[in-house]
Image (cartoon, helix red, strand yellow):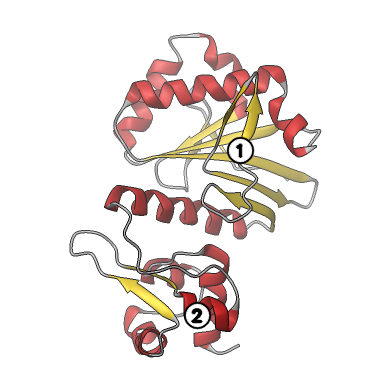
Amino acid sequence: MRIWEKVIEGLKRYHFLTYRQLINLGVGTTNSNLSPILRGLIKDGYVHEWRRPTYESFFHLSHKGAKRFGGCGRKKYKKRPLEIDHRLRTVDVEILLSEHNLKFCSKYYDPGKKTNIPLIGKSFEPDLIGIIKTSKQEELYLVEVEQGVDLKKITQKIELHVLALKVGAIPNHLEFKRGYRVLLVVEHKNILERVLKKVQEDTKSNFRENFLISNDLQNWYNLVGKERKLYYT
């Protein structure tokens, strides 16, 4: 597959990608390697770029590109910077899970999404639901990406997931009969440390192994701060 085809396939799958993410996916090796290919796709009207002076620029399929190649096309993106970065960070998690044989994925902004989960007369929506297949079994993850510093908001989200665990909301919604984990991705190490300190002060630590928290997508900790792997083989 040629590089431009890999770019198109990546944008069809992930919707939004930066240079960094395209390189992580193995589409290209450097920005300068990818730049002329992306310039050509933009010139032909198949791809839009949003340049941001203080944030990562990113690419997505245009309506013309989606009509030609499939996938989800958009006009030039006009969401707020924080919302864009939230979506790009969600893509980072999907790319991570893709490295571990991702069999199912639904994000909160996908067409036909499956992320809206009924919960005792209301509903809640994680940012991403993914299932990977390991050498032993399938593993289900619910992903929450938190880029702010609002500790109360983050702990309330944990409480919501604890309630879902207690009432079995996820098995009922997804027909997944095994246990699962919530991946909580925060932006900074100090936020991770504050969340762990807060959680350990109350009973939510009873669900310590149902949650994994990280700020770098490499080092993961349960709710009492013990280092854990995404899964064990």
Looking at the rendered structure, the secondary structure element under dot 1 is loop
Q: Quadrant of residue 16?
A: bottom left
Judge the density around disc 2: few (<14), some (14-19), many (≥20) Cα neighbours within 10 Å.
Answer: many
* Whole-percent x, y for residue 217 in the image: 46, 47
- 232 sits to left or right of 66: right
Residue extending furthest toward the left: 53
Mark 1–mark 2 Cα distance, whole angstroms, equals 29 Å
Q: What residue lies at 65% left-to-right and 56% top-to-bottom? A: 100
Residue 38, placed above or below residue 165: below
* Whole-percent x, y for residue 189 in the image: 33, 37
Residue under label 1: 116
The earlier-in-sequence mark between 1 and 2 is: 2
Q: What residue lies at 76% left-to-right and 31% top-to-bottom? A: 171
- 62 sits to left or right of 232: left
Looking at the rendered structure, the secondary structure element under dot 2 is helix
Name the amino acid type tagged 1: Asn
Q: What residue lies at 47% left-to-right and 48% top-to-bottom? A: 218
Quick one: 50 or 150, which is closer to the camera?
50
Quick one: 174 or 209, which is closer to the camera?
174
Name the amino acid type tagged 2: Gly
Residue 202, placed above or below residue 173: above
Q: What residue lies at 61% left-to-right and 18% top-to-bottom? A: 163
Count of all numbered marks drawn on residues in the image: 2
Of the 4 image quadrants, the one containing the C terminus is: top right
